[in-house]
Amino acid sequence: MPETRLFDPITLRGVEIPNRITVAPMCQYTAKDGLAGNWHLVHLGQFAISGPGLVFVEATGVEPEGRITPGCTGLWSDAHEEAFRPVIEFFRDYGASKIGMQLAHAGRKASSNLPWNGGTALKADEGAWQTYGPSAIPFAEGWHVPEQIGDNSMKRILDAFVDATKRCARLDFDVVEIHSAHGYLLHQFLSPISNRRDDKYGGSLENRMRFPLEVFEACRAVWPDDKPLGVRYSATDWVPDSSWAIDEAITYTRALHERGCDFVDVSSGGNAVMQTIKVAPGYQTTFAAEIKGAVPDRCVMAVGKITLPHQAETILTTGQADMVALARGITYDSRWAWHAAEALGDERARFPVQYARSHPSMQGLPIPGNPPPAK
């Protein structure tokens, strides 16, 4: 049987990830006061036993004000730390997958309603809270005007990222990813659409990158040396005449890697309502390919409407990326990795012993304890 690139292991620092399939962070909007619960255990646990190499927890706020919605998970207290412990224990006891945490701060896009309740900015009587951004520019008409982050707020937020990273280390997460995409706080600093500051954190690209890089450096300093730390970012704003596009993203990538970044997860958009995105299968892989071409010795993860096994394999074998991340497709089919292995003829998919008899090669065998069929 052939061995594919998709099921080759990959090692980042001291962590060997058994294959190149990643479950992308997917917000579930089901936490209570930021606390993960039974939904998160089942949601993440289904992937732990279904064969992907790496599974990410959803974007998790490093402080209460950093949550996108009231239903988003958080990691700012001992209680929030302990709420994730059952998830880690399940992965260790039953899963072959590695588990990662995505740490996030929503910035000016925080304090919004649940998507199935409209996803718009919360009103005061709905529990709205103060939002923060690099500049006092709302995300869109009708959204909260964020408070421009000053020195005290900047230190508070940086310290919150560091504290959450320490909690991830205590919980024994395998990987941490810092969210710098989709119009959330660190992306807001990077893009001139949302960053109109005239101090050392605004204006030039060097200045706009300063705070995101400070956050990364501070987290890298407290994260174990033998574990990978990466960044998800948007490669472009999809807005004509905005300078945040692939060339600046490449510069950001190089700056991150100089500071010890182990992988980049290349997405796009999310910072402006005037964005014009051309969505199609694999529509973001060209960005990943350009990043990979600029930093060929570093790990690049592609994401965005990757749904088919041969599509994923092609992305890897053509050198566009080193890993692929799936979201809606793998939620629709949580056994995607098993089915991909069958479609590609690769026998290296991971099955837990409890489910081994579901493999096509074992279907039809007698139930253990029952007599074999008569010949």
Image: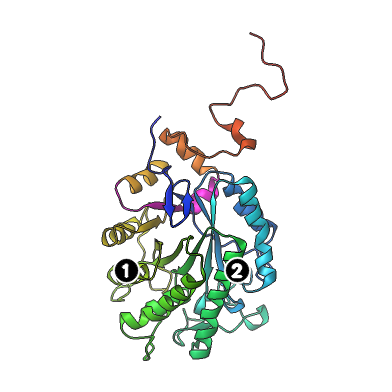
Q: Does the magenta-highlighted stretch encompass residue 319?
A: yes
The 10 Å Cα crowd at callout 2, few under 14, some 14 to 19, many 20 or more, is many
Instruction: Check the picture and name the quadrant holding the N terminus.
Output: top left
Work out whether residue 143 can be spotted: no
The residue drawn where x is 61% and y is 77% is: 64
Q: Badge 1, how many Cα within 10 Å: few under 14, some, many 20+?
A: some
In the figure, is residue 51 to the left or right of 127? left
Read off the residue under disc 1. 254
Q: Earlier in the sequence, mark 2 or mark 1?
A: 2
Residue at coordinates 46% horizontally, 61% vertically from top-left? 228
Range of magenta residues:
318-334
Q: Determine whether, in the image, residue 215 is placed left or right of residue 124.
A: left
Residue 223: image location, x then y, percent: 51, 67
Q: What is the secondary structure assignment of the residue under circle 1?
A: helix
Q: Nearer the viewer, residue 242 or 301?
A: 301
> What type is the residue that disc 2 sits on?
Arg
Which residue corresponds to the image point at 70% horizontal and 69% vertical from the top-left? 79
- Image quadrant where residue 188 sits: bottom left
Q: Quadrant of the C terminus?
A: top right
Alpha carbons under labels 2 and 1: distance apart = 27 Å
Callout 2: helix, strand or loop? helix
Q: Amino acid at mark 1?
A: Arg
Circle on res. 115 = none
The residue that mark 2 highlights is 167
Whether residue 368 is visible to the viewer of this picture, yes or no, is: yes
Residue 129 coordinates in the image, percent (x, y): 61, 82
Q: Nearer the viewer, residue 253 or 297?
A: 297
The stretch drawn in magenta includes residue 194:
no
What percent of the width, then of the height, locates residue 163?
57, 74
Indicate left or right for 21 with 373 as reference. left
Q: Is residue 325 above or below residue 236?
A: above
Marks 2 & 1, CB-CB < 8 Å contact: no
